[in-house]
Image (cartoon, rainbow, N blue to C red):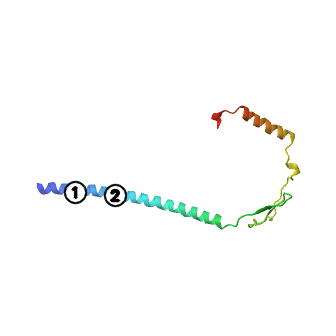
């Protein structure tokens, strides 16, 4: 009788240890999958940072007349190194309607301002 009780206790202890080992193995597998996913994310982020860092910087020089030209960097295929603008400095001044609209918008926000608006 005592022998049967010992065997039964040993079997129950073995079952508990086996269940614990299965849970630990599952946690380990889950941790490995997460580690691999985060490793791929880290490596891709590092590769993107290296790619951005290795590109030559784009340098734009603006002369006294307001003309801009790209000095450094590589131009895209089919594009020239110079920048083209459709508007000149004389056309940049706002019209009367645009000026009134800006003033009206400013006054509308200023007069309706409350500290809670942020």
Picture residue at 46% right of the left edge, 60% below the top? 33
Q: Residues within 10 Å of mark 1 (few under 14, many from 20)?
A: few
Picture residue at 73% right of the left edge, 32% below the top? 111
Q: Position of residue 9 (x, y in %)?
A: 19, 55
Q: Residues within 10 Å of mark 2 (few under 14, many from 20)?
A: few
User: Outermost residue toward the right?
Assistant: 90
SS state under label 1: helix
- In the rendered view, would you say 55 is above or below 92? below
Q: Which quadrant would the N terminus be assigned to in this image?
A: bottom left
Q: Position of residue 53 (x, y in %)?
A: 64, 65
Q: Quadrant of residue 29?
A: bottom left
SS state under label 2: helix
Q: Position of residue 67 (x, y in %)?
A: 84, 59
Where residue 88 is drawn, which disc sits there?
none
Q: Tell me the distance, in whole angstroms, between the alpha carbons under discs 1 and 2.
A: 16 Å
Picture residue at 54% right of the left edge, 61% below the top? 42
- In the rendered view, would you say 56 is above or below 24? below
Q: Which residue is mark 2?
A: 22
- In the rendered view, would you say 96 is above or below 13? above
In terms of depth relative to the viewer, which is nearer, 82 or 68?
68
Q: Which residue is mark 1?
A: 11
């Amino acid at each position: 009788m005592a022998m049967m009780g010992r065997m039964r206790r040993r079997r129950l202890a073995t079952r508990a240890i086996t269940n614990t080992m299965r849970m630990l193995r599952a946690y380990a597998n889950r941790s490995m999958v997460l580690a691999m996913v985060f490793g791929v994310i880290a490596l891709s982020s590092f590769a993107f940072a290296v790619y951005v860092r290795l590109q030559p910087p784009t340098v734009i020089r603006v002369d006294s007349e307001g003309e801009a030209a790209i000095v450094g960097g590589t131009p895209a295929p089919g594009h020239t190194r110079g920048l083209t603008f459709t508007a000149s400095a004389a056309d940049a001044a706002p019209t009367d309607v645009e000026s009134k609209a800006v003033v009206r918008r400013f006054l509308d926000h200023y007069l309706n301002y409350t500290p809670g608006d942020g």
